[in-house]
Image: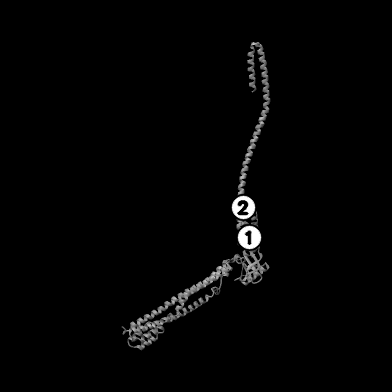
Amino acid sequence: MKTLKITSIAIAALIAAGTANAQKTFAQVTAEAKAELKAAEQELADLRNQIANEKIPLSNELTTLESKVLEFRKERDEMKSSRDSSDLRLEDLRKKVKLRSDENIYLRNTMAAYVKQFSTRIHAAELQDYKEIADTAEHLAENETATDSEKFTAQLEVLKASLKRVKNIMGGTTIKGDALGKNGLQVSGTFVLAGPFAYFGDGGENIGFAEGDHTNIGYPLVVNRGVPPEVLATIGNLTATGTGAHPVDPTEGDAIKIALVSETLIEHIKKGGVVMFPLLGMFFVAILLSILKFFEIKSVKSPKAGTLQRILDSLNSGNKQQALEAANSVDGPFGDLLVAGVEHADEDKEVLEEVLYERLLAAQPKLERFIAFIALTAAASPLLGLLGTVTGMIDTFKAITVFGTGDPATLSDGISVALITTEYGLIVAIPCLLCQALLTRIAKGKLGEMEQASVAFVNGLNNKK
C-alpha cells in the first residue's frame, strides 16, 4: 500500500516538473526531482522500517492467535469427544436403568408369587403364626395405591420369616396352637416340628402325628390311628418336654394315610349300612343252598349199565316179579320211574308213557327246588346294592347342605361309603348267578337222563306197539 503511494508521488512529481518547464530550468527541475526522490526514498525507508517494526508484533500476534486457534480446536475436539463419551455413558446408563427396572419387576413378581405360595407350602400348624404377615404382603401386592417400597418391605418380611422358619425347623421347634383331635373337636396343645415331621400333643388322649394336608379346614388333624402305643408315648413326652427322641416316618406320611384308609372286613361291611344285612343274609343262604343242592343233585344216581336191559328182559319173558325186584334195587327218582314202569308195563303204550311222564314231572321239582331262590338272589342283590348307594348319596348330599363342600376328603369318603353296597351287590350277584347256572345245568342233565330212560323203557317192551 505504501509502495503504491510512493509511485504515485513520483508520477505526480514528473507531471509537475513537466508543467513547470516553462518557468524553471532543467537543472532546477532535476535538483528538485532528486530532492523529492530522496525524500520519497527516505519516506519509503521509513515506511519499510515501520512495516518491519510492525510486522514482528503482528507475526507474534498471529502466532499467538494461531496457537489459540489450535488450542480452541483441541478444546473443541476434547469437548466433542467428551460429549460423545457422555452420550455413550448416558445410553449405557439408560440400558442399565432399564435392566434394573426389569430386574425389579421380575423380583417383585417372583416375591409376590412366593408370598402367595408361602401359606400353602408351610405346615398347617405354622399357618397360625405366619398367616398375618403373609396376608399383609398379599393385600399390599394387590393394592394399586401402595408404593413399591411398601410392597417390597412386606414381601421381605415374609422372606425373613421364611428363612427363620427353615432355621427353626432344621433344629426342631415347638409351636402352641390348635388342632382337630378325637371326634373332630378343636383342641389346644403343642406342636413339635422337625424337618418334614410334625407332632401334636395336648397332654391327654389327643397325641399323634399332625397331618398338615387339611389346611382347607383351618387346623391340622391329629392322626394316631394305627400308631403303636410306644410311638404315641414317645410323641407325648416330646410334645410335653420339647426334648427327646422323635419317631421318624420314612414315607413322610404315606404310611399313616394308608393306615387311615385301611380297614378290616367287618369295618368295611359296617360302612354299607342297614342294606348290608339283607344282602349278606341272602348271600349266605344262597351259597349254603347251592352247596346242599349240588350234593343233592349229585346224589341222584343213574341206573348201572345193564340194569334197564335186565328189567326189560324180565318183563318180555313174563317174569314181572323179577323185573320189579331189579327196579327196586335202583334208588332215587330213577328207581321210582322204573318201578312205575314195571307196575304199568301191561297197560297201553299211551298210558305207560303218561305214567312215566308223571314220574318225570314229579322228580323235576325236587331236582330244581331252591334254584329259583339262588336266581332271585343273583337278580335282587344288585338292586339292593343300588338302593344302598342311592340312600347313602342322599345322606351325603344332606351333609353337604348342612356343612358345605369345604372338605373334599369328607365328601369323597361319604361317596365311597355309599358305593360299598353296590360293590357287595355285585360280589353277591356274580357267584350266585354262576351257582344258579351250574345247578340248573346239572338238574337238566339228570332230567334228560330220566327222559332218555323212559323212552328206552317204552321202546324196549315187545308187546308195546
Above or below: residue 368 compared with residue 65:
below
Residue 384 at what x, y percent from top left?
50, 74
Nearest to the observer: residue 134 or residue 255: 134
Amino acid carrying label 1: it is Asp
CA separation in Å, label 1 and label 2 = 22 Å
Q: Which residue is mark 2?
A: 104
Residue 192 at what x, y percent from top left?
65, 66
Amino acid carrying label 2: it is Asn
Residue 350, can we see it? yes
Above or below: residue 258 compared with residue 63:
below
Residue 183, located in which quarter of the rendered image?
Answer: bottom right
SS class of the residue under badge 2?
helix
The quarter of the image holding the C terminus is bottom left
Residue 47 at what x, y percent from top left?
67, 22
Residue 398, located in which quarter of the rendered image?
Answer: bottom right
| Residue farthest toward the front in the current orientation of the protein | 401
Q: Are marks 1 and 2 in contact (CB under 8 Å)?
A: no
In terms of sequence position, does the residue under pointer 1 or pointer 2 come before the other? 2
Q: Closer to the observer: label 1 or label 2?
A: 1
The quarter of the image holding the N terminus is top right
Residue 227, can we see it? no
**Pointer 2 local density, CA inside 10 Å: few below 14, some 14–19, many at least 20:** some
Above or below: residue 417 compared with residue 83:
below
**Pointer 1 local density, CA inside 10 Å: few below 14, some 14–19, many at least 20:** some
SS class of the residue under badge 1?
helix
Residue 146 at what x, y percent from top left?
64, 55
Which label belongs to residue 310? none
Q: Which residue is mark 1?
A: 135
- Residue under the point 68% across and 24% down: 50
